[in-house]
Image (cartoon, helix red, strand yellow):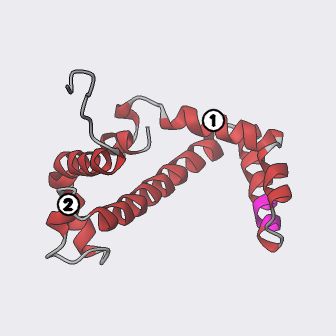
Amino acid sequence: MFKGVLPRMGMFHTSCTLFRIIGKRYADAGLKDLCIESGVKAEGSIAGVLEGRKYNRAVRFNKLMYEALIRLAWKGFYASCVTEDDDLKENVFELGLKVDEMSDNICRNTISEILSTREFSDVSNKCQQYLQTPRSKWDLSSFRTWWN
């Protein structure tokens, strides 16, 4: 009767499993302490977040961790392009000016214009290359899988 039926997990349970894997892999690397000391989660609820049982809290925490790690990676990328490549340094500066201008007038057309510029393309490609560098080259190497 059920020969053609193959049970599988849905997206919710797959996400919970992913959060559990992340929690298990990085909890001893300071993720638990970081979560508590930053004030993102209370000490009593961190176990549920890292074990994938508190879905909404885990989503929020992982988004915040992703953003924090990307900001750190961006600082490293920016420092490397300032010292290594003058053309890239100029492109990053020009892109920063365009983003500052965009903050005064946020609309779909402005964002599309920025995303279609040569500066954005160059900076984006170089940043992707930087994020793919060998693990031994930078401090966040053990957390690199978070954004890959």
Q: Does label 1 or label 2 sit earlier along the sequence?
A: 2
**Amino acid at the residue labelled 2:** Arg
Q: Quadrant of residue 35?
A: bottom left
Q: Locate residue 34 relative to residue 123 in the image: left or right.
A: left
- Residue 74, percent across and down? 54, 51
Residue at x 48% of width, y 52% of height: 70
* x then y, percent, for residue 44: 14, 76
The numbered mark at residue 53 is: 2
Residue 139 can be seen in this image: no
Crowd class of label 2 (few under 14; some 14 to 19; many from 20; radius 10 Å): some
Residue 55 vs residue 90: left or right?
left
Mark 1, residue position: 126
- Determine the secondary structure under disc 2: loop
Quadrant of the snapshot with the N terminus: top left
**Circle number at residue 61:** none
Question: What's the magenta bit mostly, secondary-structure-wise?
Answer: helix
- Find residue 56 and report its horizontal and vertical position in percent: 33, 66
Q: Nearer the viewer, residue 98 or 93?
A: 98
The amino acid type, in three-letter code, at marker 1 is Lys
In the image, what residue occupies the spot 18% across and 54% down?
27
Around disc 1, counting alpha carbons within 10 Å, would you say few (fewer than 14), some (14 to 19), or many (20 or more)? Answer: some
Q: Position of residue 125 (x, y in %)?
A: 65, 34
Region of the chain picked out in magenta, as a range: 97-102
